[in-house]
Amino acid sequence: MINSGIKKHSFLKWEWMLILMLILINIMNASLSPYYLNYFNISSAVMAFLDKAFMVFPMAFIMMMGDIDISVASTVALSSVIMGIAVQAGLPMPLAIVLCLGTATLCGWINGMIITRFKELSAAIVTISTMILYRGIAYIILEDQAASGFPEWFSFLGWESIGPIPFIVIVFTVFAVLFWLILHKTIWGRRILAIGQNNTASIYSGINVDKIRLMAFTSAGFMAGISSLFLTSKMASTRPNIAVGYELEVIAIVVLGGVSTSGGRGKIHNVIMAVFVIGLLKYGLGLINIHSQLLSIIIGILLILSTLLPNLGEDYLKKKKLRSNT
Amino acid sequence: MENKLKNSFADYFDQFRELGLLVFIVTLSIIVQIRNPSFLTGENINDLLKNTAILSILAVGMMLVLVTRGIDLSIASNMAFSGMLASLLVRDFPQIPTILILLIGLGTGTFFGFINGLLISKGRLLPIIATLGMMYVLRGSTFLISKGKWVSAYQFTDSFKAMATGSVFGINNLILIAAAVYLIAYYFINHTGTGRRIYATGSNPESAKISGINTDRMIILSYSIMGLLSGLTGVLWMARFASAQSDSAMGYEMNVIAACVLGGVSMGGGSGKVGGIFLGALLFGILNNTLPLINISPFWQNALQGAVILLAVIANVLAKRQVTKKNLNRRIK
């Protein structure tokens, strides 16, 4: 009784906190730069940070189950490099795109297979090893070279708009709706949360935990492939060292989005808001020429505070309840 | 009787793990030696150990953190920050004695390790989140205090550089420091009450608490030690490469975690041996050192490292399963 009251309270608070942060950031940006509230600028800002945002959804699922996937950025690099050499070898672009998505999905599937077959290993260890391995394979393939020569229309993905809306925003919206529906409206979503709440109980109540974990990790691979397409399209060339450190940024966004990393709690719309909080903050500070390193301090502090404050608040409420009970 | 049997099996398995690693290292060395006779020469071994020293020192701290069921992603940024602070002091105030600079580096590292421990124990933050946040803060601060500029070789004093390049009786200082750290760690972990309490905290936090161990204090202590060692290696890193940059040691935390895992430290907490992580770090160093010697392109290095770690942890699981199976079979009979 006490517990549920506290949970509901802090949940509500978190959604409002994110909305408040978004409003504050927009006010700050608009007051910092007269060029901010301009459709062209905002849409270019959105284009700039959405490419890594695709990985946020499967990462949210994985973290809701109490796992983590550190290899996603290396998957981006490997699939992008494979696409690059496929094009250089003279393969048609559509086939190269299929190869890119296929490689990425395979990477995720391998992670999932190892994690579900060897349950003694934590997902962190498996994906740290595959993180080193996948990027290593990308280095074996391309060494220190870059691959380019993508056809002109491929840059459409990253740069063009359909009508007034950037193409990347449309794709992002489609995936956002899809993942929102899966988590909040299907039995799969309930099962993911159940696994995060109590793995053993989920197994005994007949949930095929292995299958769901395997699917989550495979989808993380696939979405890394989508990110890889957009990123490569924007840069028009690829190297083995692209997307270094993206995995931590993706994890930071998911945590800021209120997904409990010990599993069992989280909402997709909060995660989407967190994508925009970080993205717009980055863009606004970029407008006034603040170096991205200063931004990393702000992200770090946000990350710590966003989990510390609810914990402290919970402690405070618990104490208050106890006091009023006695 | 049955208990004794079970114990001997557990012992057997523990030894098997380190023995397996040792056999692997020896086999690898023999293969490399056959292909390039200059591998097992005094000079190359000295080089190899020198290159592994920093990694192996950090592995000690990481092992303690992993033992308490934690993880520390902020160590590389902590190294960069402490090292950069020390380097800036050397550049701007060359008259400060080197030992004081080293102490300042150690203090800075320890302070941030302490904050990590505080956030994780008192603030109930998950270790991966707290240290990830700290990683961002420290990496950004490193840039801030250095204003994006490098400290280059000519700006360091000779005595500062000598910390990492000097030698005593022909053995490089880094190797001696690493050896000292390992000796102290061995004594601390196996022969002091505090060391054992850290292990108790990791293997079962609830019962540790009930039996009167201040688990929060143990967690703070292990992160502070990790911070201390990060500060130490941060200063040594700058002295060794005679250059301090805001992106120094970027991504090094993953190497350290990988070396610990190779050395048989469990991510689930409560287990890990000093001998094991030494062998893990050594194997990591050999993989880095020998590829050029046997004409394998350095671009293979990452993939080989990843593959070796993955195979090692999987082999470990398979061996463990085999042992449990045998154990169970014996009990039935």
Image: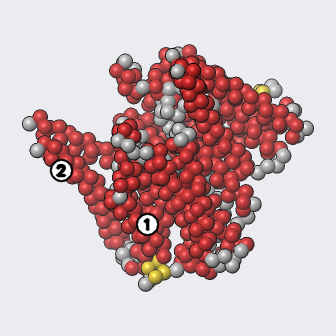
Disc 2 marks a residue whose amino acid type is Ser
Does the rendering let one see residue B58?
A: yes
Secondary structure under tag 2 reads helix
Q: Residue B201, percent across and down?
A: 39, 45
The residue under label 1 is: B181
Is the Cβ of the residue at disc 2 closer than 8 Å to that at disc 1? no
Q: Residue B10, percent across and down?
A: 23, 48
Q: Residue A21, percent across and down?
A: 74, 32
The quadrant in which the C terminus of chain B is found is top left
The residue under label 2 is: B8
Q: Residue at x 62, y 71 (%)?
A: B101
Instruction: Name the subunit of mark 2.
Output: B
Which numbered disc flags the more N-terminal residue, 2 or 1?
A: 2
Instruction: Name the subunit of mark 1.
Output: B
The Cα–Cα distance between marks 2 and 1, rounded to whole angstroms, is: 30 Å
The label number, if any, that marks residue B43 in the structure image: none
